[in-house]
């Protein structure tokens, strides 16, 4: 699975959980534009940033359900 695929899957899970990408970005401490650049393939997150984003995603999705 590519990063783009993973991001699209995460967005779908967020939507199903009633959460938004903006909420995820706020929780992860990243700018919404950063997420957009990752999704478009213009940039890639470093490992530490991606791990903290995934942790915020996990927390957000589990709280929303």
Image: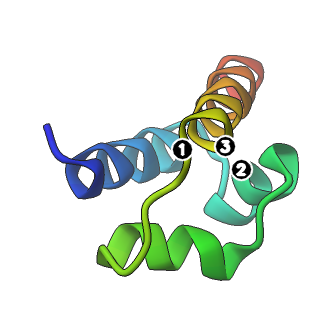
Q: Are marks 3 and 2 in contact (CB under 8 Å)?
A: no
- Residue 59 in the image: x percent, y percent? 74, 22
User: According to the image, label 3 marks what residue?
Assistant: 49
Q: Quadrant of the C terminus?
A: top right
User: According to the image, label 1 marks what residue?
Assistant: 14
Q: Earlier in the sequence, mark 3 or mark 1?
A: 1
Residue at 37%, 81% in the rendered image: 42
Q: Alpha-carbon neighbours of circle 3 within 10 Å: few (<14), some, or many (≥20)?
A: some
49 w.r.t. 36: above or below: above
Residue at 44%, 52% in the rendered image: 11
Asked which quadrant contains residue 47, the reply is: top right
Say left or right for 36 vs 8.
Answer: right
Q: Which element is circle 2 on?
A: helix
Marking on residue 24: 2
Q: Are marks 3 and 1 in contact (CB under 8 Å)?
A: no
17 w.r.t. 33: above or below: above
Q: Which element is circle 1 on?
A: helix
Asked which quadrant contains residue 6, the reply is: top left
| C-alpha span from label 2 to label 1 | 8 Å
Q: Earlier in the sequence, mark 2 or mark 1?
A: 1
| C-alpha span from label 3 to label 2 | 13 Å
């Amino acid at each position: 699975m590519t990063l783009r695929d993973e991001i699209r899957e995460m967005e779908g899970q967020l939507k199903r959980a009633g959460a938004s990408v903006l909420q995820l970005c706020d929780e992860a401490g990243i700018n919404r534009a950063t997420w957009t650049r990752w999704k478009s393939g213009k940039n890639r997150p470093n490992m530490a940033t991606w791990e903290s984003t995934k942790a915020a995603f996990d927390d957000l999705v589990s709280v929303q359900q």
